[in-house]
Amino acid sequence: MGSRRDEPLPEGGSLDRQLVEVRAVCEKMIAERDVPALLEMIAREGARLMSADRVSIFLLDRERCELLSQVTLDGQSIRLDARLGIVGACVMTGQLINVADAQQDQRFYPSVDAHTKYRTKSVLAAPLRSPSGETLGVIEALNKKRGHFTRDDEEIAKALAAQSAIAIETATTLQALKQRLDKLQAENTQLWKEVEGRFSIQNIIGTSEPIQAIVRLIDQIRDSTVYILLTGETGTGKEMVAKALHYNSPRARGPFVAINCAALPENLVESELFGIEEGVATGVKRHIGKFEQAHGGTLFLDEVGDLTLAAQVKLLRVLQERVLERVGGRTSIPVDVRVIAATNAILDNAIRAGTFRQDLYFRLKVVTIHMPPLRRVREDIPLLANYFLRKYSQEMRAAPKKLSAGAQRCLTKYDWPGNVRELENEIRRLVASTRRTIIGEEDLSDTIRAAFHEGGVSSTEPGGSLKGAVEELEKRLIAEALRQSRGNQLQAAKALGLSRQGLIKKRNRYGLKPT
Ligand SMILES: Nc1ncnc2c1ncn2[C@@H]1O[C@H](COP(=O)(O)OP(=O)(O)OP(=O)(O)O)[C@@H](O)[C@H]1O
Ligand SMILES: [Mg+2]
């Protein structure tokens, strides 16, 4: 397609010399990783090698079907329709074009000249084609210093174009990768900040003595890898403490792997914890266990009291020797894992009953942290409630809310059998369902309000006697029945399945005098 001219071949192998120079330029190009600097280098060296007045590099923007030249020798950037002009013809056909007098050529597109105030005479355009055959753009030389572009110039343009395409593709790929990497690194730093903020020790709320003691202890042992046993009722913050221990320790950037031993079917416990080799039974695939997944980090063994005895034996061995064998495996795999175990059962009872190994218990509880039930740290309830109010108002983009004095009294009086989790859920519900900025007593859940008005305190303490718990329940049911019957004893007795005399006896015994 190029209008080739019969030029006399240069004497004395001058093309060879020039091609040697092209090669030298190419070596410099390959070393240049910065795309604008590379394009500028190609333009500058191209102009020198082909004795052109200027050289521009056009890169093809396929999506917009445009050619963009950011680097021209006079520093102007040009964007044009990829189908226009001699460069357009070059990129569309993929052929070199050599034109002695552009003004006479039909393909010439004069508006660029008008825009750049340049007068184009001769043009030599070569396509930039990547090794995979994709057209990346065009290298265009303008106005040969003397005469017009020769066949030697065409050879130089082709060689330069071939090498430039490789260098440009490499540099743009690297640039894109670097941008991605920078973006990922920025995101990663941001995410780590959020993770560390979320699990920071400051987020363990409470000024009561038991909570403060726990916070002090966590701070003291944050750099050590001692095994820890967390005990306490449901919802008291065992997992929260385990995460705080992990994310504030030197292992913070390692994995935090949690496994709930109670939720594991008995036949899967060992393979889930320690992994399994392929082919142990028909169709069994190789599986990496939680211990190996937690290598370099922390393994949180939740409800550890529910482990099978066989799994307990294996666990003890891993804790003692710091190596494990996968189920059906023969090699010992070293593991570096900090174990934090949790239980809301009283393990002493399990040991007595023979369902939990004492030696394992002693291994696990190098440090024991007991999380108090919320009703034992009532003074922290307003603090926690306000903390959750702030947290969920922000999260749900709701206006900041406050608790009325009455609501606060109710919350403080209630026994919270589900502990902090129950309080957190109650506040989350209130933030989602109340539009007013002051949350009143009447907004609270019925059970919480009822508990306040009955004035009862539950006796669901672990370790409390059955008799005490039954009495407590009786007291509550009687109070509730009386409240509903508005003090009518006969009606209340009927509802409770008691005789009137029976009810009166119980009222006297429990000190529930008629009001
Ligand atoms: N002192 C506290 N400060 C702030 N949030 C707390 C506190 N204690 C508990 N929480 C929150 O209460 C919720 C329940 O806590 P967590 O899941 O750690 O309880 P758990 O003891 O592991 O309960 P379970 O035995 O049921 O698994 C979590 O959202 C936790 O962040
Ligand atoms: Mg838990």
Image: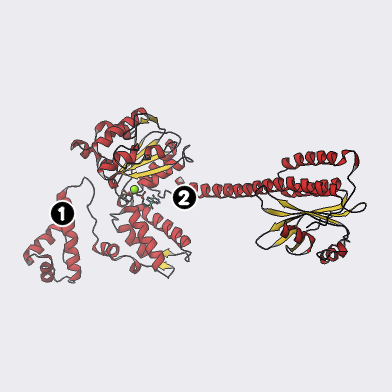
Q: Nearer the viewer, residue 296 or 501?
A: 296
Q: 324 or 19, which is in the foreground?
A: 19
Q: Position of residue 401 (x, y in %)?
A: 44, 65
Amino acid type shown at disc 2: Arg
In percent of width and height, residue 276 lies at 34, 37
Task: Say which element carries label 1.
Answer: helix
Specify the label residue 482 is tagged with: none
Q: Is residue 413 left or right of residue 437?
A: left
105 up-or-down from 318: above or below: below
- Identify which residue is drawn at 35% across, 44% down: 259
Q: The N terminus is located in which quarter?
A: bottom right
* Of residues 222 and 42, the one drawn nearer to the viewer in this rendering: 42
Q: Is mark 2 within 8 Å of ligand 1?
A: no
On the question of residue 230 being in view, the answer is: no
Name the quadrant containing residue 163.
Answer: top right
- Compared to 486, does 210 lie above or below? above
- Three-letter code, disc 1: Val
User: Cβ of disc 1 within 8 Å of ligand 1?
Assistant: no
Q: Nearer the viewer, mark 1 or mark 2?
A: 2
Please give the name of the residue rendered at 41% of the width and 66% of the height, measured from the top-left corner: 432
Mark 2, secondary structure of its residue: helix
Tell me where residue 223 appears, x and y as whole percent.
Answer: 46, 35
